[in-house]
Image: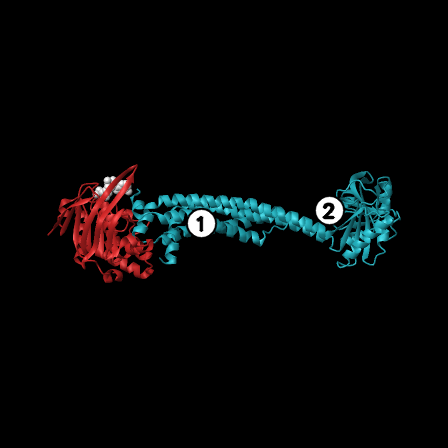
């Protein structure tokens, strides 16, 4: 039997039962599309987080109060009680290393801010001029916090774009006065729109000098110290210096945690990669279901066509020919189903992209290839049983069935 | 025509089919039904044989074994000198394809296919290219008087036409043996007469012909008439 004839026979048999064929194609297509859409979702989350951390720079160390055994995303981030505060003097001491370019102390709190009768509760961040350098922030107008000594409480502030819009109602805010808690400060600059960055909505933040924040919140301790190394290669030296400095200043106790963005990123990457895999696994189950469906329908097809198989065998068809014929049918179903699934999946992803334009939805290549491969394998695997049953039928017994 | 068949040495020179103590039994429930019970038979190339007997006497079982559609429980069957019990599954399939044509009482055409496509089936299974098999199938159908029906689907044909398509399919590979199991059993006497004329014409060209029938008139036309009862051949008349 020529290959073209086999394909024509298989295709003819599928075309003869259009409803059944359509249902099977749909089942496979949904499985494949599910793999694509779910992995695209997982990847979008991973890429988004990765992008967030990349924007921080890979030459950044974050120093947090408190000692934690593990490093990575969870460490220190939720540290509560601290054995000893990190002070501004500690932060300044870090500048003595040749491996360290600059440091930015950070204090975070909540406070009400007001202009005239307009008032809002916002996140206040106390820091220094270095912070904008480290974060690569740009200004919409005016300047960032002045580059003065950390201890100085200059009455200036920098506001996020949403704050600027809501409190100043479209008037240029630079040079205007703003009340922060029980203090007043002059608006030195308006941040360009940043959006959500590392889970913080920068656009609704008011930034003030770190010393002012300390007295506003009445705390000597820092929330974080961002340390920028001279280069990526200087990272280990910078980290060693940070730890040694704190040990020396805190009576031999290493009571801080130093996290590199690389480590945080790796942890997130790992978590989200696992998430994508889990989603792919869930979707693959639906592919398996489609495979079982194909098998059952093929078994029904074999028993419905027992007479035809008996006839083919009576006319001299070898076992291998009947086997190939039914496998070709199963493979056609799987292949066409996978193709339809890829189209359906990309349509779904395109739709998601329209709904959430901030995210990049793209299924990983391995997911597309894997989904198609799995559906083909399922088609083959689940096609083999009915095909073998057909091939082994005894011609006379098959013909006698009516 | 198959070269193996022509060159094979036959035990007594002439017999194309030879059965020795051939039995076939079926397990029905916990009982054994002996459909064939120690049949001995020699058939020479070119014979025209009718096989008659009451219903259930084993005619179809015998014909199915001769056509390699079924295997005996015991005994031996030589086809053109080759012992069939030792044939592999593939060899059996190839022999069915090349050496034997089989015509069924219920035609067994594939309805979704046209007359010519049905006739092409054995050629397709044998790997004959499209153009060649189309012309060969058309030629055989023309000889059956069906040129006007070539592109009709089988469910658009009358019973007699269907059986003629089935005969065309059985002989399109040019076998040496044609086996017909009650080929006129489902036809009126006019269509039945036509079918008989066609298979006799094929016999005249050298085909070995075995016809199972209930019809005394048809059975008596054969040169050799076998009568079966209870799985045995009880009468073997020639001339
Ligand atoms: N597949 C089968 N299973 C069980 N019994 C069968 C089978 N085929 C035939 N028989 C039995 O074998 C006997 C001969 O059947 P068959 O050859 O069809 O008779 P005939 O064709 O002469 O009418 C019958 O008793 C029949 O019931
Ligand atoms: Mg019968």
Vertical position of residue A100 compared to residue A213: above or below: below
Q: Provide residue A111's location: percent of width, then percent of height.
A: 81, 40
**Is ligand 1 closer than 8 angstroms to the Cβ of mark 1?**
no
Image disc number at residue B83: none
The N terminus of chain B is located in which quarter? bottom left
Q: Provide residue B128's location: percent of width, then percent of height.
A: 32, 60
Question: How many numbered circles does the render carry?
Answer: 2
Mark nearer the N terminus (1 vs 2): 2
Q: Colour of chain A?
A: cyan
Q: CA distance from mark 1 to mark 2?
A: 51 Å
Q: Provide residue A177's location: percent of width, then percent of height.
A: 85, 45
Q: Are marks 1 and 2 in contact (CB under 8 Å)?
A: no
The residue sitting at the top extreme is: B30
Q: Residue at x 29, y 44 (%)?
A: A400
The residue that disc 1 covers is A333
Return the residue nearer the eye: A365 or B212.
B212
The residue that disc 2 covers is A70
Q: Residues within 10 Å of mark 1 (few under 14, many from 20)?
A: many
Q: Residues within 10 Å of mark 2 (few under 14, many from 20)?
A: few
Vertical position of residue A101 compared to residue B27: above or below: below
Assign a secondary structure to mark 1.
Answer: helix
Assign a secondary structure to mark 2.
Answer: loop
A33 lies left or right of A396: right
Q: Colour of chain B?
A: red
Quadrant in which residue A101 is drawn: bottom right
Host chain of mark 2 = A
Q: Provide residue A90's location: percent of width, then percent of height.
A: 85, 49
């Amino acid at each position: 039997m020529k290959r073209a004839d086999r394909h024509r026979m298989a295709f003819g048999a599928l075309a003869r039962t259009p409803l059944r064929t359509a249902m099977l194609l749909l089942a496979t297509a949904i499985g494949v599309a599910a793999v694509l859409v779910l992995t695209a979702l997982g990847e979008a989350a991973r890429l988004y987080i990765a992008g967030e951390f990349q924007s921080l720079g890979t030459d950044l160390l974050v120093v947090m109060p408190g000692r934690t055994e593990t490093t990575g995303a969870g460490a220190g981030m939720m540290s509560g009680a601290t054995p000893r505060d990190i002070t501004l003097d500690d932060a300044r001491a870090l500048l003595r290393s040749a491996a360290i370019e600059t440091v930015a102390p950070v204090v975070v709190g909540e406070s009400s801010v007001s202009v005239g009768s307009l008032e809002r509760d916002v996140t206040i961040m106390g820091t220094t001029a270095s912070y904008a350098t480290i974060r690569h922030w740009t200004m919409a107008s005016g300047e960032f916090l002045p580059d003065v000594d950390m201890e100085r409480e200059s009455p200036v502030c920098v506001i996020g774009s949403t704050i600027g819009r809501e409190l100043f109602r479209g008037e240029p805010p630079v040079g205007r006065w703003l009340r922060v808690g029980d203090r007043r400060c002059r608006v030195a600059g308006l941040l360009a729109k940043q959006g959500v960055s590392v889970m913080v909505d920068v656009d609704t933040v008011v930034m003030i000098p770190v010393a002012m924040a300390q007295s506003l919140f009445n705390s000597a301790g820092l929330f974080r110290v961002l340390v920028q190394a001279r280069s990526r290669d200087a990272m280990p030296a910078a980290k060693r210096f940070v730890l040694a400095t704190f040990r020396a200043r805190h009576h031999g106790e290493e009571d801080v945690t130093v996290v590199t963005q690389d480590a945080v990123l790796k942890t997130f990457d790992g978590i989200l990669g696992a998430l994508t895999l889990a989603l792919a696994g869930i979707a693959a189950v639906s592919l398996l279901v489609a495979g079982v469906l194909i098998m059952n329908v093929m078994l029904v097809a074999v028993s419905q066509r027992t007479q035809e198989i008996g006839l083919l065998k009576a006319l001299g068809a070898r076992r291998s020919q009947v086997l190939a014929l039914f496998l070709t049918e199963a493979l056609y179903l799987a292949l066409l189903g996978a193709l339809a699934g890829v189209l359906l999946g990309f349509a779904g992803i395109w739709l998601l992209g329209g709904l959430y334009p901030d995210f990049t939805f793209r299924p990983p290549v391995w997911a597309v290839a894997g989904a198609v491969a799995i559906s083909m394998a399922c088609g083959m695997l689940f096609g083999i049983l009915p095909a073998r049953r057909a091939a082994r039928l005894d011609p006379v017994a098959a013909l006698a069935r009516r | 025509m198959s070269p193996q068949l022509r060159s094979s040495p036959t035990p007594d020179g002439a017999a194309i089919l030879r059965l020795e103590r051939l039995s076939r039994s079926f397990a029905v429930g916990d009982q054994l039904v002996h459909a064939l019970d120690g049949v001995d038979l020699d058939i020479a190339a070119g014979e025209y044989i009718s096989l008659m007997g009451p219903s259930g006497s084993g005619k179809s079982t015998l014909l199915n074994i001769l056509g390699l559609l079924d295997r005996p429980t015991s005994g031996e069957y030589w086809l053109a000198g080759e012992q069939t019990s030792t044939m592999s599954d593939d060899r059996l399939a190839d022999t069915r394809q090349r050496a034997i044509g089989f015509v069924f009482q219920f035609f067994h055409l594939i309805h979704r296919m046209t007359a010519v496509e049905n006739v092409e089936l054995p050629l397709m299974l044998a790997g004959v290219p499209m153009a060649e098999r189309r012309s060969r199938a058309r030629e055989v159908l023309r000889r059956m008087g069906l040129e006007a029906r070539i592109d009709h689907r089988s469910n658009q044909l009358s019973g007699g036409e269907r059986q003629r398509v089935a005969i065309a399919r059985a002989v399109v590979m040019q076998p040496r043996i044609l086996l017909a199991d009650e080929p006129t059993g489902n036809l009126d006497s006019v269509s039945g007469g036509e079918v008989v004329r066609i298979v006799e014409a094929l016999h005249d060209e050298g085909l070995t012909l075995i016809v199972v029938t209930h019809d005394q008139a048809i059975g008596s036309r054969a040169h050799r008439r076998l009568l079966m009862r209870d799985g045995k051949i009880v009468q073997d008349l020639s001339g």
